[in-house]
Amino acid sequence: MFNLPSLNYAKDALAPFMSERTVEFHHNKHHQAYIDNLNKLIAGTTFENMTLEDIIIQTASKAEYTAIFNNAAQVFNHNFFFKCLSPNGGQKPKAELLDRIEQTFGSYTNFEQEFKTAAVSQFGSGWAWLVEDHKGKLSILKTSNADTPIAHQLKPLMTIDVWEHAYYLDYQNRRADFVDSFLAHLIKWE
Ligand code: MN
């Protein structure tokens, strides 16, 4: 059984960059629904006692398990996304990761631009990510729908949800403005 993780901030704490209404729908309706669906789908199956990551890896690219994969991946993606937000966000990461970002992308500003391009250019629903591979190489990735770095042997370090439910109440069709707000005011590094 998976449970909805509690948020590390009040639902109204991210306003005006992400409204209480958006957080309420996104966390208590959308995120909760993925968890409820996953729990129903895995009840009584071999997936019931696996970790989320193992469920994702075992069901990825298997047509008979599409529904389990989609819900497990969305639970993982949302668990991670809500930890990437803070009322005191918009800071750069700490020295070690910042150094690696600067070495990979040239500067933190260049990283922000490339991350924004990935987030804005993701066609339809999906996610933009900063990931690292097993050698520690950083890259920016965009994924469609529920797809997740966990299914590609990549470790996520940062993400933004660009499904319309993440921003439409606050920004309507202006996804680029949502990404700007995320980078300037909400992004929280470990
Ligand atoms: Mn979402």
Image (cartoon, rainbow, N blue to C red):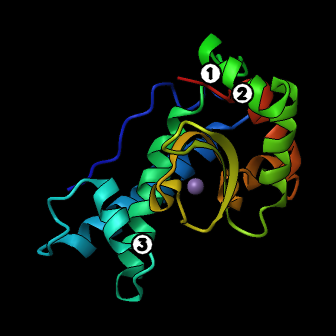
Counting from the top left corner in percent of width and height, residue 94 is at 62, 13
> As drawn, which residue projects farthest toward the front?
135
What secondary structure is found at the residue carrying circle 2?
helix
**Mark closest to the chain's N terminus, 1 or 3:** 3
- In the rendered image, residue 135, in percent from the top left (x then y), is placed at 52, 40
Q: CA distance from mark 1 to mark 3?
A: 29 Å
Residue 130 visible in rendering: yes
Whereabouts is ligand 1, in terms of quadrant? bottom right
Question: Residue 26 placed where, x, y %?
Answer: 55, 51
Which residue is nearer to you in this view: 58 or 145?
A: 58
Q: Is residue 44 above or below residue 16?
A: below
How crowded is the residue under tag 2: few (<14 C-alpha within 10 Å), some, or many (20+)?
many
Task: Please give the residue where the numbered disc 3 appears in the rendered image.
Answer: 60
Asked if residue 120 is positioned above or below residue 96 in the image, the reply reads below
**Disc 2 C-beta below 8 A from ligand 1:** no
Q: Residue at x 27, y 75 (%)?
A: 41
- The residue that appears at 47% across and 60% down in the rendered structure is 74
Task: Give how far apart the Cα atoms at labels 2 and 1 are.
Answer: 6 Å
- Amino acid type shown at disc 2: Ile
Q: Identify which residue is drawn at 64% across, 11% down.
A: 95
Q: Secondary structure at mark 1?
A: helix
Does residue 42 appear left or right of residue 96 in this picture?
Answer: left
Residue under circle 2?
Answer: 101
Q: Quadrant of residue 144?
A: bottom right
Name the quadrant containing residue 102: top right
Q: Circles 2 and 1: CB distance less than 8 Å? A: yes
**Residue 178 visible to an observer of this rendering:** no
* Residue that label 1 marks: 97
